[in-house]
Image (tube, rainbow, N blue to C red):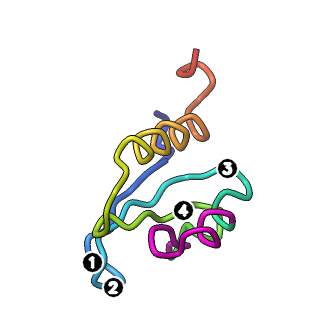
């Protein structure tokens, strides 16, 4: 994929929480964190670029996470791979 990262996991690196960090469209991070801070957060390092963190140690909607992972991929994937 040309070395572009669109998702990563965090296993208690900065706190005692298990999470996934995803590339997100402009404005999504702020909207999600404000709407549900128990599930979403601004991750360290990549949060300044608009990435969203999703806690995985709470009840998880895996369908929603799957959709968000797919969207994250589409944000950074080269156009040729999206065709």
Q: Which numbered disc, 3 or 4, marks the residue that appears first in the sequence?
A: 3
Q: Is residue 30 left or right of residue 38?
A: right
The first of marks 2 and 4 along the sequence is 2
The range drawn in magenta is 31-43
Residue 72, position in %: x, y?
53, 44
**Cα separation between marks 1 and 2:** 5 Å
Is 57 in front, or is 79? 57
Q: Answer few, some or many: residues within 10 Å of disc 3's Cα (few below 14, many 20 plus, some between 14 and 19).
A: some
User: Who's the residue at 55% across and 73% down the image?
Assistant: 42
| Cα separation between marks 4 and 1 | 16 Å
**Disc 1 to disc 3, C-alpha distance:** 25 Å
Q: Residue at x 46, y 33 (%)?
A: 1
Task: Choose the circle earlier in sequence order: 3 or 2.
Answer: 2
- Mark linked to residue 15: 2
Name the residue tied to disc 4. 52
Of residues 82 and 28, the one drawn nearer to the viewer in this rendering: 28
Q: Name the residue at the right extreme.
A: 27
Q: CA distance from mark 2 to mark 4?
A: 16 Å
Residue that badge 1 annotates: 12
Q: Position of residue 26 (x, y in %)?
A: 73, 54
Q: Marks 3/2: CA distance?
A: 25 Å
Quadrant where the C terminus lies? top right
Residue 79 location, quadrant: top right
């Amino acid at each position: 994929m040309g070395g572009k990262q669109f998702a990563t996991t965090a296993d208690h690196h900065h706190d005692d929480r298990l999470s996934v960090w995803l590339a997100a469209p402009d404005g999504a991070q702020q909207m999600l964190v404000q709407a549900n801070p128990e599930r979403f957060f601004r991750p360290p390092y990549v949060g300044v670029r608009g990435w969203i963190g999703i806690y995985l140690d709470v009840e998880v909607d895996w369908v929603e996470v799957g959709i968000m992972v797919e969207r994250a991929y589409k944000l950074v994937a080269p156009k040729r791979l999206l065709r």
